[in-house]
Image (tube, helix red, strand yellow):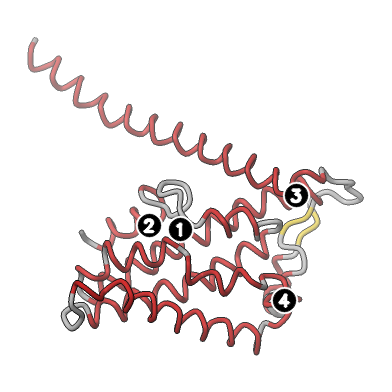
Amino acid sequence: MNARGIFREGLWDNNVVFAQMLALCPALAVTTSGTNGLGMGLATTAVLVSANILVALIRNLVSPQVRIPVFIVLIATLVTLVDLALNAWLHELYKVLGLFIALIVANCAILGRAEAFASKAPVLDAALDGIAMGIGFTCALTVIGLIRELFGSGTLFAQASLLLGPRFAFLETTVIPDYGGVLMMILPPGGFLVLGMLLALKRVLDARAAARRRRPASADFSGAET
């Protein structure tokens, strides 16, 4: 698979959340705002890319019988490093995400990509796959968070400068001033509702794209018969 195919897989066709239906715990739990979703997505992406690269580097050195324990140890080590880095440099975000950073170790998407792709691919392809899957995951969490935040409080990327640093202050936007908000959207049911609507939307778009691809083929076949 070329780089374009790898990125298409990660961003859309095989998106971690919207296609594989993996990592739904952080997708629903931490996406009460776009800022939280973005922060969690970036942390997971860092682990995913690093894990893919390391697994690709050692894929010929680890016997198949012990590959899963080895992969888990590598992922746990990387998560620990990310956890310490967030605590040191983005402490406010670390306090918000809390336990979910440590739970990246149990993220099925990371171990799944290590097993399904990185353990069978060269380093460059594994790195591209990690980047693509990470960006796709980050976009999914950010979109879910933004929709919940918009309907829940009328803002976008609230407290971005506090959680992600002063450079992200430009993201903070008040869309609906003096908005009371829909409380349910920032509670657990809101996560399920938004995820369900986005999954339905993706399926509709995929069905329409498939129909457009079939239409020229059908037209050509009819013309050939005539």
Looking at the image, do the residues carrying marks 1 and 2 touch, with CB atoms under 8 Å apart? yes
Sequence-wise first label, 4 or 3? 4
Identify which residue is drawn at 25% across, 27% down: 214
Q: Report x, y in % for residue 49.
A: 39, 74
Per the image, the residue denoted by label 2 is: 10
- Residue 2, relative to residue 53: is it above or below? above
Give the SS element for disc 3: loop
Q: How far apart are labels 1 and 2 at the CA level?
A: 6 Å
Provide the residue designation for mark 4: 95
Residue at point 61%, 51% (across, down): 144
Q: Earlier in the sequence, mark 4 or mark 1?
A: 4
Residue 5 horizontal/vertical position (percent)? 27, 56
Q: CA distance from mark 3 to mark 2?
A: 28 Å
User: What is the three-letter code of the residue carrying label 2?
Assistant: Gly
Which label's residue is closer to the chain start, 1 or 2?
2
**Residue 135 placement, left or right of 101:** left
Between marks 3 and 1, how big is the CA–CA gap? 24 Å
**Disc sitting over residue 187 in the figure:** 3
Of badges 4 and 1, nearer the viewer stands 4
First in residue order: circle 3 vs circle 2: 2
Comparing 117 with 102, the one in front is 102
Q: What residue type is disc 1 on?
A: Gly
At label 4, the amino acid type is Lys
The answer to whether residue 113 is above or below residue 224 is below
Residue under numbered circle 1: 136
Q: Are marks 3 and 2 in contact (CB under 8 Å)?
A: no
Q: What is the CA distance from the residue labelled 4 to the residue labelled 1?
A: 24 Å
Q: Amino acid at mark 3?
A: Leu
- CA distance for labels 4 and 2: 29 Å
